[in-house]
Structure formats: structure tokens, C-alpha cells
Image (cartoon, rainbow, N blue to C red):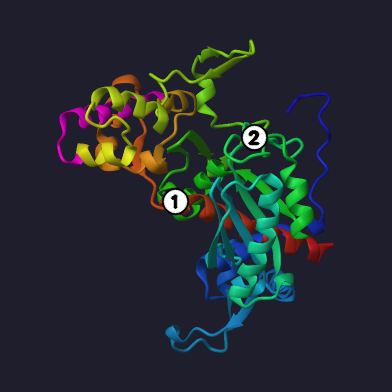
Amino acid sequence: MNNPTAKPYAGATSATVRELNLRTVWGLIGASAPISRAEISRATGISKPTVSAVLEDLLQIGLVAETADDSRGFTYGAVFFKPRPEAAYAVAFDVGARRLRGALAGLDGAEVVRLDAEVDKLDAPGMVTAAVRLARELAEAAGVPQSSVRHAVIGVPGVVDRRDGRVRQAANVTGMEGFAAQEQFSAALGMPVTVENDIHLAAHGEYARGCGGSADSFLFLSIGTGVGAGLVLGGHLHRGFKGAAGELDDAFEPEYTDNADGTRESSVPTGTDPCAPALMQYAARKLPGEPEPTPERVFELARAGDPAALDVAHEEARRIANYVAVAAAVVDVELVVLGGGIGLNGDLLLAPVAEHLAARLPYPPRLETSALGSGAVLAGAASLGASLTVEQLIREYFG
């Protein structure tokens, strides 16, 4: 506050106050519809004449509609208002190595229609082409004009550099490393595009529509073929300075492998990494009768009471606790949500992970498994897309 180089406070103009009032009223209508002018005024403290002006703006934009409320009996001519989620749409994508998941969402973030496309062996430019095709199919399936689809949110497996929109640390899709995803998807789709790390979107989805909404701050930890994390702090998705928040693999000292060409590769030590390939190396030693074990088979045996498989599950719990402890010790989250193919085995993992955390942390977080499963990324993209579309409509209206 006392920084001599800080810019002087510009103060609120009548236009910014008008927009602020509009967002406040819009949010209240979405949460409390049907609602009258008088009720909006009482709930927000905004004067009735100002509420009337804001409602006129919202009607002009198309975000709300007048409605009746027959459940109240006599309303003495009061007019009620409700949101219009069909005023515009957002398209959401979850980019995977084998499948491109897509959904069309209304302004309430709810999926109107969902379609998937097989994209095995497609490179990054091919994913862009597939997304354009799938966006068209989604609009057709929903029976809405493509012009009503105003924003796209795309979840990709990699760090999205917030400075230039390029994707880093992307190993699952050929050509995605360094790919100018923001620019390429936007140009091809012909609309504003937001590209996000897929696990960040999963965290946003859990907060909007899953069990994450029960906490003000939480960590979403996805454990499958790889490990990724998303942080929601103070009700907001925390991406970090460059978009790399949640890359917990980087918190552990790597082990190095010397290649024949003289280069060195680094990776998380297999005795630390909770990802499926590392855990299956441990499982192969513990389960000699399963020379090529899979996570599904190991957890199936554990549920059947196999001692060796239970040992593998407990080892995985120890590894997960190590990852959780790194984040919890720094940001003191209230909740940790486990997701991914391995993380969803909560019946075998939650209790031992909690025991490890209680032994290590003075304030251990509570634990839950994802309520959205494999749909978390798409739910997050749809929710974020809806809110960004509303902002886009408001900005366009106010010029």
C-alpha cells in the first residue's frame, strides 16, 4: 500500500459500478430464481430504481427472462425473474491421448449434450482439427446454431504457460510440447478460447459440481498413469505465476538415467512415485504370480484380502501421503480429493493415507474421493466456459 511506485487508485466510474451491480444481480438471480425486484433490492442493498435499470440491462443482453411464481399464491402483480442458460453456450474439451471428450454447456455450466471422438495417434494439429469437427457435431446434436457457441475451454495434459499460451511438459500427445494451443485452437474454432491444464480444470470441476464445494481450499490429486494436482485456494483456482502450480513431481529429488548418446534423463524415483507404472514395478516384486500386474488386478486382489496385494495398496497410500504432505505443509488445505484411475480406490486408500498424514502433519486435511470420476475435467471446462461466456456477453454489451 505504501509502495511509492504503485499506480494511484483511479476510483470507480459510473460504468464500473453499473457492471458491478449487474454481476451482483445476475449472481443472485442464478442462485435464488424466481425472484422479484423488491427481493433483489432487499438482498443486495441496491436501490429499487437501480435494480430496475440493471434488470433492463440483463433483459437486453438476454441473460434473464420474466417469469411467474405460482407457488406463492397472491403476488399482487409482482414480476419475477429467472436466468436464461440457453442465451448462449460454451464448448468444453478434454484432450487425451486416445479420446477427445466434448460437451456443450449452457450459461449455468450444465452439460446440454456430450460426445466423444477417438483420436488415437493424432498429433497436436490433428487434435485441433478434431475439436473443430466435434464442436460442430455438438451444436448439431443440441439443435442450436453454431453462432450461439461463444467460448471454448480446452483441458490439455501439460502446463499451459500463462505468458504465451504454449503447452509445456506435455508427453501424452505428439507435438503438444511447445504447441501454441491458445492461438491454434482459437483460430480454428473461430471464437475466444481458454486453454487450461486438465488437472486444474478437474479441480475447478470438483469445486463447482463435486465434493470440493464443501471446502474453501482443497487439493485435487489425480493418480493414474501420471500424477497431477490442482489447487483451489480461497474459492479460486490457483494456477501459479507461469501456470505450473500443482506439479508435485518437481518437489522430489529426481533420479537420473544415462542414455547411450550421452544425455541424461530425470524422473521421480520409483520408490517415491505413486503413478501406476512405478507402483506396478513394486507390485511385480510382491506378486510373483502376477508378472505383469495392472492396477485394476492389484486392487481386485486387495479387496479379496490377498496379503501381498494389500501390502501394495498400503505402499501406494504411503506414496500418496508423501505427495499430499508437500502441498498441505505449504498451503494448509482443508480437503484433499483423490482422483484418477488409482486415486478413485478410496475404500483401500483413504484410511491409510489419513493415518500417514496424521502422523506427519499437525493439521492434516480431510480426505475424499472424486465425486465426478473421469468427468471432472469436462465438468470443470464446462463450468469455467459458462462463466467466461457470461463475462464475454457483458463486455460486449458495455462496449
Would residue 121 be visible to someone looking at this image? yes
User: Is 358 left, or right, of 30 in this rendering?
Assistant: left
Residue count near mark 2 (Cα–Cα under 10 Å), binned few <14, some 14–19, many ≥20: many
Q: Specify whether residue 392 is painted magenta.
A: no
Residue 322 point in image, percent of width and height = 39, 23
Name the side, left or right, on which 367 lies relative to 70: left
* Quarter of the figure with the C terminus: bottom right
Q: Can you give x and y, in whole percent of width and height, for residue 92 in the image? A: 60, 57
Mark 2: amino acid: Gly
Q: Is residue 20 above or below residue 226?
A: below
Mark 1: secondary structure: helix
Decide if residue 83 is in sight here. no
The quarter of the picture where residue 295 lies is top left
Amino acid identity at mark 1: Ser
What's the mark number on residue 243? Answer: 2
For residue 22, above or below residue 288: below
Residue 43 is drawn in which quadrant? bottom right
Identify the secondary structure beneath mark 2: loop
Residue identified by numbered label 1:
374
Report the front residue among 373 and 240. Answer: 373
Of residue 275 and residue 328, the one placed in the foreground of this image is 275
* Type of secondary structure dominating the magenta stretch: helix
The Cα–Cα distance between marks 1 and 2, rounded to whole angstroms, is 22 Å
Magenta stretch in the rendered image: 303-322
Question: Are discs 1 and 2 less than 8 Å apart at CB?
Answer: no
Q: Position of residue 271 (x, y in %)?
A: 38, 18
Q: Which residue appears at 59% of the width and 67% of the height?
A: 106
Q: Is residue 191 above or below residue 271?
A: below
The reply, left or right, for residue 232 in relation to residue 309 is right
Number of labelled discs?
A: 2
Mark in front: 1 vs 2:
1
Magenta stretch holds residue 318:
yes
